[in-house]
Image (tube, rainbow, N blue to C red):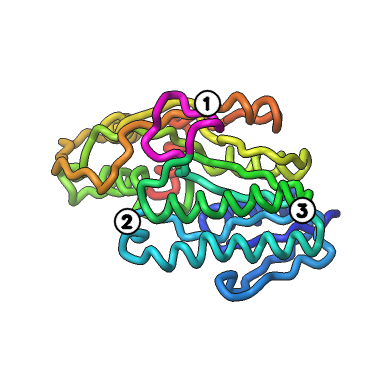
Amino acid sequence: MDKIGLTGADGFVGTHLVKRLKNEGYDLLISDCNLNHHIPSFEDCKHVIHLAALTFVPQSWEQPNLFYQTNTVGTAHVLEAVRKANIPLTYISSYVYGNPQYLPIDEEHELIPSNPYMQSKIMAEEICNFYRENFDLEICILRPFNLYGSGLSKKFLIPLICEQVLDKNKKKIHLRSLTPKRDYIHIDDLISAILKSIKRPNSESINIASGDSYNVKEIAEMIMNICSIHKEIVSDGTIRLNEIMDTKADISLAKKVLDWKPQVKIETGIEKIISEMK
């Protein structure tokens, strides 16, 4: 079976992807070198998937240089590796559209950074585009929207709410602003899109999302309904710096280019998380 090169194998997406690739029969070459300072080697690989990145937006305000080093310089080093090996690359990017000028957001939407994390990913995409155009490489950029699923850090909204709902010692659900809306995509659906990009190499930038949008209050109520547990929701009204109030993706290009569409309904995805947390 073909050998696949992979960075970021120990992250949220990576752990799910490794299991799926092995189940599909692929051989893996996992690069765990420090991509900030070293160019990896992908000898004998047929395709590379670049996942390694820092992703927690609040941290990017505290350590912006670390995000530029990891997400931008690290990607440049991976691109140099695939250039030398002359093999296709799937690059996972996200949160690059900033405050949307229209909904749903298609891939032609302007990329507008509103925090250091976004800027680091946009800069990485620009380097991908340069290598794609000037070195005749197949580089597919997948842009997942808000990921969720088993194993996601409890810093993120859905597992944070699930934990509070299931905690018998907590009488209320404590959240920040209840109004921001997001387009949530289950990790299994992203993994399926990545596999499609291996089997159908292309040079596109593609949204991976559900095409639906839910606000924080709706997510909390959905989780409580699934658990048949109802608690008061308490919001402190805090809105993060440069908070984006609504996102909803146009996923028509993914359907056309990758023959992909989401399969996991959000209620089903949340049920899986809850069953594993009980």
Mark 2 and mark 3 lie on one chain; the one further toward the N terminus is: 2
Residue at point 21%, 39% (across, down): 177
Residue 6 within the magenta-colored segment of the rendering: no
Q: Quadrant of the N terminus?
A: bottom right
Residue at mark 2 to residue at mark 1: CA–CA distance: 26 Å
User: Along the horizontal axis of the image, is 163 left or right of 40?
Assistant: left
Residue at point 62%, 62% (across, down): 76
Residue that label 2 marks = 58
25 versus 5 height, above or below? above
> Which of 64 and 155 lies nearest the eye of the viewer?
64
Pair 2/3: label in front: 3
Mark 3 and mark 1 lie on one chain; the one further toward the N terminus is: 3
Q: Which residues are magenta?
A: 97-110
- Secondary structure beneath disc 2? helix
Mark 2: few/some/many CA within 10 Å (<14, 14-19, 20+): some
161 versus 221 height, above or below? below
Mark 2 and mark 1 lie on one chain; the one further toward the N terminus is: 2
- Secondary structure beneath disc 3? loop
Residue 228 seen? no
Q: Which mark is residue 135?
A: 3
Task: Name the residue type under label 2.
Answer: Pro
Residue at point 60%, 24% (across, down): 252
Residue at mark 3 to residue at mark 1: CA–CA distance: 29 Å
> Which of 112 and 10 lies nearest the eye of the viewer?
112
Q: Is disc 2 in contact with disc 3, using a CB cutoff of under 8 Å?
A: no
> Which of 175 and 274 lies nearest the eye of the viewer?
175
Q: Main secondary structure of the magenta part?
A: loop
Residue that label 1 marks = 250
Residue at mark 2 to residue at mark 3: CA–CA distance: 35 Å
Task: Name the residue type under label 1.
Answer: Asp
